[in-house]
Structure formats: structure tokens, C-alpha cells
Amino acid sequence: MIDIAGAVTAEAIDEETRDQPEPAHRAAGVGPVAAHYGDPMREQRTLATGVGLVDRSHRGVIAVPGEERMTWLHTLTSQHLAALRPWQGTELLVLSPHGHVEQHAMVAEDGETTWLDTEPGMTGGLLSYLEKMRFFSRVDPRDATADHALLSLVGPEATGALDTLGVTGLAAPDVVAVPGPKFRSGELPSRPSVVYDVKPLPVGGWARRVALGVDLLVPRPAMAGVVDELRGAGVPVAGLWAYEAVRVAARQARAGVDTDHRTIPAEVGLIGSAVHLDKGCYRGQETVARVHNLGKPPRRLALLHLDGVTTDQPPAAGTPVTLDGRTVGFVGTAVHHFELGQIALAVVKRNVADDARLMVGETAAAIDPA
């Protein structure tokens, strides 16, 4: 954790275990992250309008060295990785045989190692799957969470703050437009569906430009120095609560939080970022192709505005969303937003109208149609 006076950890306020390091990481000295630093709403505004530094070192980090790493990962995951070049990043999914989302990881390639960072609590499952699929491939995946930590510069001024660390010129994400149903094979370029610019950091590790700002993977011994350097240049810190509020407002789903065991990529907006629609066979591909060609996923991700809240505690993940007494979905992440009030990401049935009068527990909810 960033050791700063006033930090209140998620652990200290009984935050759900999904935002805590895995037991093996805790045994290796990876601690909890800060939920906030005394003023969550001010921290949110900072991330939305300027730039702030968020400690996300509870995320799992997997290093995949080996000369066959790119072709090997290409065959196992939903992303087109065979053409990923050094100092580029992307996203990938591991799907079940039926096409359900099992794992989501952010990717960065440095020319020697492919780095995967994933949700707290999901590292062990992803690493176990990769190890089972090694066979005779020249790859050596390992858990690198104890050695490397993820920090995030979040906000519209994130790239400018990188000047302090000697990194300039990070390009904006390059996203391939998702074609309509029944497109002809070969229409999509043979490259990842989204490419993030990645540059090396002087202290080791890298900086990766993403939709919400810039991710920094740094060796853990260098973490305190990087934080001090950025704070000395005037970059304020913000907690995980502020980051989550910005993420929810941007409608970015988290695997394992805003998904359930039946979630397919098309339901939660992961086709455009983590799935390539025209690549070789991988587990779950038939479901992805069938749903895309029909153009009718059974559910969809929605941003809900919650009304008449009688408690400061947002609805828990998994709380049913109902319409006229019938369950039509579930809540994922619910937050207090500094401008929008209490909002939540929810997965609801596709045929639920935007003007439907929904309930989340005893709270009225409305879909934001934007």
C-alpha cells in the first residue's frame, strides 16, 4: 500500500474480499490498498477533471517469458496476439468451453516478457490454467505479484504527469471498430482489437496508456520512490473508491464483480476491447461468433441511477434487479458518484426497456440510456 498519512484501507472498513490481495500474495507481503485518503468525493473530482495517483497494487501480476509466448497465448485466449509487437499492450479473455467469461487480463509486451495483470482473487485461477496448457511450449508463466506492483495515473491529465518520470509521447488507445453481424472473414486486421501504447520506465517496468489514464507497473522496491516523485511534482493521491466511481461512470465492467458464471463477452462490452472476431480457434469461440452473428446477446450491461436511498451503504454485488416483482438482472458495482449520485453497473435482460421502472432491493432504479 502507498504509505501516506490519512489512508483508510478497504480492509479497515470491512470492504468485500474481492478487493483484497490473494492469501498467497499477503503471505508474500502484499498488503491492502487505500479505499480513500479522507475525502472520497474530492478524490473523485480530481480523477474526473485532472489527474490522481491510485494504488492498485492488490492486482495480480503474471509474467510470461519464453520464445513461444505470443503464439501460445494467441491460441488460448480471445485476443489476436500473434502480431502484438514489443512495447504494445491489449486485453484478453479466457472463456469457458461454452463461451462464458472466466478470466480477464490486461496485457503489456516488453520484447522479452508478456505481462498480464488481473483482478484480485483471480490470479491463481489464471496461472493454473496457463500452467495446465503449457504442454511442450517454450514458455514459463509465473506469479510476479510479490515482485511488481501496479499503480494508475487516472484522469485527462495523466499523460502529462508522466513527464516527471521521464516518459513522454504515449499514444491514445487504438481500437478496431467492431463490424456488424455476418461480416465477411478477413475484414478485420490481423492485430489485437485494441492496442495500448507501452513505454519503459527508468526504474524498470513500464507505463501503459489505457482508457482511464496510464497504468504503471513498477518493481515493488521502486514503488515508494515513484510515488514520492509524482507527489513531489504535485500529483495528488486518490483511493480505490474514487477509481471505482470513475470506472462505473465510464461503464467499464470488472470480471468477477460485474459478471457472473453465465456472462458472455457481448453482454458486458468486452467484444471491442478483449475479443478479436476473426482469428483462429480458441475455447468458447463458437458462442462468441454465434451471438455476434445473431446480434442478440441475452443480457446487456446497464448504468443504473438509484433513487430514494435510505442508507450510505450501496447495494452489494449480486443484489437482484427486479421489474414488477420479477428478477431481470443483478447489480455489480454500486458507488456514490460526486456528480451522478448513487449509481451502479448492472447486467439486465436484453428486452428490459430503457424506461422500465426497476427496483434494486427496496430502492427504485432507472436505466441511463446514454
Image (tube, grey):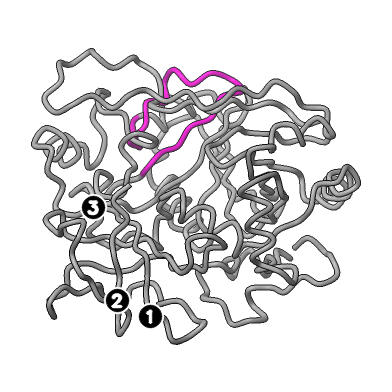
Q: Which residue corresponds to mark 3? A: 300
What residue sits 88% from the left and 50% below the top? 228
Single out the mark in the foreground, 2 or 3: 2
Q: Quadrant of residue 176?
A: top left
Query: How busy is the neighbourhood of tag 2: few (under 14 within 10 Å), some, or many (20 plus)?
Result: some
Q: Which residue corresponds to mark 2? A: 364
What residue sits 40% from the left and 53% below the top? 253
Query: How busy is the neighbourhood of tag 3: few (under 14 within 10 Å), some, or many (20 plus)?
Result: many
Q: Are marks 1 and 2 in contact (CB under 8 Å)?
A: yes
Q: Are marks 3 and 1 in contact (CB under 8 Å)?
A: no
Report, in whole angstroms, how far the alpha carbon at label 1 lies from the one at label 2: 7 Å
Callout 3 secondary element: strand
Q: Amino acid at mark 2?
A: Ala
Q: Nearer the viewer, residue 101 or 316?
A: 316
Asked if residue 206 lies left or right of residue 93, the reply is: right
Asked if residue 51 lies left or right of residue 293, the reply is: right
The stretch of residues the image draws in magenta is 75-93
Asked if residue 91 is among those painted magenta in the image, a careful observer would answer yes
Q: Amino acid at mark 1?
A: Gly
Q: Amino acid at mark 3?
A: Arg
Report, in whole angstroms, how far the alpha carbon at label 3 lies from the one at label 1: 24 Å
Which of the two labelled residues, at mark 1 and mark 2, occupies the earlier sequence position? 1
Single out the mark in the foreground, 3 or 1: 1
Q: Nearer the viewer, residue 83 or 238?
A: 238
Callout 2 secondary element: strand
How far across and down, in percent of the image, does residue 124 sit?
Answer: 49, 58
Asked if residue 12 is among those painted magenta in the image, a careful observer would answer no
Which of the two labelled residues, at mark 3 and mark 1, occupies the earlier sequence position? 3
Q: Which residue corresponds to mark 1? A: 308
- Location of the N terminus by quadrant is bottom right
